[in-house]
């Protein structure tokens, strides 16, 4: 088994994006907004040199540190894409008999008449996620990929069919497109 002395990965920062590193927190600013994320591990270092951000491990890296460097690179790339292009997720409301009505109230999505139930079901909307209701289509947008995905998961979980055969009762709100 050969051990490498140091692993260093670099990410090019595109024009119009400003990245700063304070301790273990990465701050990214772009045309769509700003976001920050704590990327903390004792052996992994983050540094910004000009228009390149370096993710490195100098203290005898092992398999875990190599994997974490790739994870950190993915997080930083997702943050850069979020502040430049943003993230969008489309969901579709499907029903067979009882028409489902969706509406946004504050930081919750209210799903009415799901399987003919009297009381509405509710799904939490995370901060900085905007939901646009266009009939049977829901469009979720944000600069944070994780928050869009978690909000979509909250909506799918709220419309989960319980105590019935899911092959027959396929009603719900499902993800149609991510991007």
Image (cartoon, helix red, strand yellow):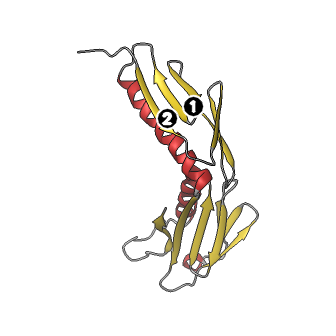
Residue at (64, 75) in percent of width and height? 133
Residue at (57, 31) in percent of width and height? 39
- At label 1, counting other C-alpha atoms closer than 10 Å, the crowd grade (few under 14, some 14-19, many 20 or more) is some
Question: Marks 1 and 2: CB-CB under 8 Å?
Answer: yes
Residue lying farthest to the right in this orientation: 106
- 159 and 47: which is toward the camera: 47
Which of disc 2 and disc 1 is earlier in sequence? 1
Q: Is residue 31 left or right of residue 157?
A: right
The picture places residue 125, in percent across and down from the top left corner, at: 66, 58
- 42 and 48: which is toward the camera: 48
| SS assignment at label 1 | loop
Marking on residue 72: 2
Regarding residue 144, the answer to whether it shows in the image is no
Marking on residue 39: 1
Quarter of the image with the N terminus in it: top left
- Please identify the quarter of the rendering in which residue 141 is found: bottom right
The picture places residue 100, in percent across and down from the top left corner, at: 59, 80
Regarding residue 32, the answer to whether it shows in the image is yes
| SS assignment at label 2 | helix
Q: Is residue 154 left or right of residue 65?
A: right
Query: In the rendered view, would you say 126 is above or below 42?
Result: below
The picture places residue 31, in percent across and down from the top left corner, at: 67, 54
Q: Is residue 37 left or right of residue 60?
A: right
What's the CA distance linking mark 1 and mark 2?
7 Å
The picture places residue 131, in percent across and down from the top left corner, at: 65, 67
């Amino acid at each position: 088994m050969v051990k490498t002395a140091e692993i260093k990965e670099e990410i090019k920062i595109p024009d119009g994006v400003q990245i700063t590193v304070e301790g273990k927190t990465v701050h990214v600013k772009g045309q769509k907004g700003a976001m920050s994320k704590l990327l903390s591990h004792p052996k992994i270092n983050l540094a910004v040199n000009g228009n390149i951000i370096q993710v490195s491990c100098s203290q005898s890296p092992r398999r875990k540190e190599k994997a974490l460097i790739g994870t950190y690179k993915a997080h930083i790339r997702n943050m850069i894409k979020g502040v430049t292009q943003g993230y969008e997720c489309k969901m579709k409301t499907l029903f067979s008999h009882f028409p489902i009505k969706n509406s946004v109230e504050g930081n919750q999505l209210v799903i009415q008449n799901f399987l003919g139930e009297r009381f509405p079901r509710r799904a939490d909307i995370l901060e900085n996620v905007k939901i646009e209701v266009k009939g049977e289509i829901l469009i979720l947008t944000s600069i944070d990929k994780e928050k869009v995905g978690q909000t979509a998961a909250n909506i799918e979980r709220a419309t989960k069919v319980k105590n019935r055969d899911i092959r027959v009762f396929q009603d719900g709100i499902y993800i149609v497109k991510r991007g």
